[in-house]
Image (tube, grey):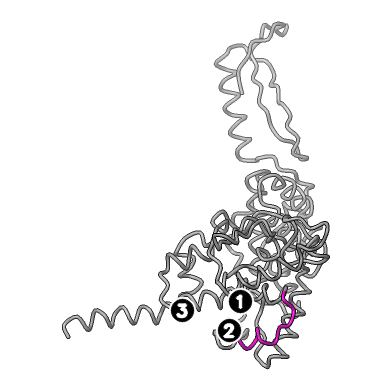
């Protein structure tokens, strides 16, 4: 934005003009050149008047649809977020399809409420999953505000979370140590025995376990290095990708329980006999570890063993919760639990496992109450 003097004045001697960049309806940056004025002061005053009008009616891409905005959002995020985050966006993005044909300038609370009805009509989807998708939609709208000047602020304020009062909260299932021993006794494949122990004793996420390679295991120092994870787009797909762990603090080096260490040594002795064996092979994988274990394969095996052992079936992620319970119930300090599980801070640990620490808090108060005794 500037006032300039033209080299060729008009017939009546006017030579001052201003130049202002702006975006057209396709969001293409263009430049507005004013008519010529007799003095610099006149041109400056006209420039200010033009800018004020521009503020009142900011140009937005009026033909852009929600689908166009979604694609622009994905393109913008491409080199800014983790692979796992991008995959998560694309997976949740399929639920935004009913909004695709709506023009961004027309999007209002009515369209949002209709979308909520569509989401609520989907069978077997929990509120927590719906709200995860809602977060993505809000992120897209915020992107539209920042990038294209769309007026979504009021709509976002009115967008309420999914909350079904009739929905039963699923209780977090865990294996107590005796239950886990019973579960483990029914497992007769050494690879899977090591997997269950790694999930239970080390509190690994299933993606972290799938990403373990033999070079991540320090047998001499009894340590395990978690530095990557293997994920699939829908968990059940055999198509996988390797990426960084969930957060920076998820990268950790932790001790290995003796029982797991001994079983890993025994399993290593078996697979290392393969003539093309390489320590870069996956610990839990197929074809001697050339390819990582498929999530669905672990899921199916878990169900079979639980049924065979006569114990309740828990989710793969609940082995991690079981590990947290084991540590807390055996008086491990919260800082140790947080570091062991790879949480970013103790607040996250408390938020996730607050119910486990209630007993510890009561015991702390007992100590205080017993001081006078």
Residue 27, compared with residue 260, is above or below; it is: above
**Helix, strand or loop at mark 1:** helix
Residue drawn at 42 percent across, 68 percent down: 334
Q: Which residue is mark 1?
A: 319
**What is the x, y in percent for residue 39?**
58, 12
Q: Which residue is mark 2?
A: 175
Instruction: Pick whichever of labels 2 and 3 is earlier in the sequence.
Output: 2
Asked where in the image residue 237 lies, by quadrant, the reply is bottom right
**What is the x, y in percent for residue 335?**
42, 64
Residue 50, compared with residue 216, is above or below; it is: above
Please tell me which residue lies in front, 118 or 344: 344
Residue drawn at 68 percent across, 77 percent down: 193
- On screen, residue 243 versus residue 372, left or right, reads right
Residue 365, compared with residue 72, is above or below; it is: below
- On screen, residue 341 versus residue 301, left or right, reads left
Quarter of the picture containing the C terminus is bottom left
Q: Which residue is mark 3?
A: 356
Please tell me which residue lies in front, 337 or 142: 337
How much space separates mark 2 and mark 1, taking CA atoms? 7 Å
Please tell me which residue lies in front, 225 or 20: 225
How much space separates mark 2 and mark 3, taking CA atoms? 14 Å
How much space separates mark 3 and mark 1, taking CA atoms? 15 Å
**Helix, strand or loop at mark 3:** helix
Residue 6, compared with residue 20, is above or below; it is: above
> Contact, CB < 8 Å: mark 2 with mark 1?
yes
Instruction: Pick whichever of labels 3 and 1 is earlier in the sequence.
Output: 1
**What is the x, y in percent for residue 149?**
65, 44
């Amino acid at each position: 934005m500037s006032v300039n003097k033209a080299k060729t004045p008009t017939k009546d001697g006017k030579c001052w003009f201003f130049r202002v960049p702006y975006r057209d309806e396709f969001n293409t940056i263009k430049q507005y050149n004013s008519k010529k004025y007799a003095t610099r002061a006149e041109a400056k005053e006209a420039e200010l008047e033009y800018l004020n009008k521009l503020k009142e009616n900011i140009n937005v891409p009026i033909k852009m649809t929600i689908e166009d905005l979604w694609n622009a959002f994905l393109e913008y995020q491409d080199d800014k977020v983790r692979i796992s985050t991008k995959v998560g966006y694309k997976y949740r993005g399929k639920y935004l399809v009913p909004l695709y044909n709506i023009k961004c300038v027309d999007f209002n609370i009515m369209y949002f409420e209709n979308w909520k009805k569509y989401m609520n009509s989907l069978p077997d989807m929990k509120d927590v999953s719906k709200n995860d998708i809602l977060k993505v939609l809000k992120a897209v709208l915020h992107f539209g505000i920042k990038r294209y000047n769309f007026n979504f602020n009021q709509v976002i304020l009115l967008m309420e979370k999914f909350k079904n009062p009739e929905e039963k909260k699923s209780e977090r299932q865990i294996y107590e140590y005796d239950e886990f021993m019973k579960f483990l006794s029914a497992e007769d494949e050494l690879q899977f025995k090591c997997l269950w122990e790694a999930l239970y004793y080390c509190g690994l996420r299933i993606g972290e376990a799938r990403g373990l390679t033999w070079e991540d295991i320090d047998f001499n120092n009894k340590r395990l290095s978690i530095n990557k994870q293997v994920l699939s787009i829908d968990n059940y797909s055999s198509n996988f990708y390797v990426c960084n762990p969930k957060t920076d603090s998820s990268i950790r080096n932790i001790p290995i329980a003796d029982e797991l260490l001994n079983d890993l040594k025994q399993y290593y002795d078996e697979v290392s006999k393969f003539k093309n064996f390489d320590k870069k092979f996956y610990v839990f994988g197929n074809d001697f570890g050339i390819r990582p274990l498929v999530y669905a394969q672990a899921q199916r095996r878990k169900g079979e063993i639980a049924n065979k052992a006569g114990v309740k079936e828990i989710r793969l992620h609940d082995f991690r919760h079981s590990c947290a319970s084991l540590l807390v119930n055996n008086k491990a300090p919260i800082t140790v639990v947080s570091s062991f599980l790879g949480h970013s801070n103790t607040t996250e640990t408390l938020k996730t496992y607050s119910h486990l620490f209630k007993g510890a808090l009561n015991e702390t108060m007992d100590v205080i109450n017993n001081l006078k005794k």
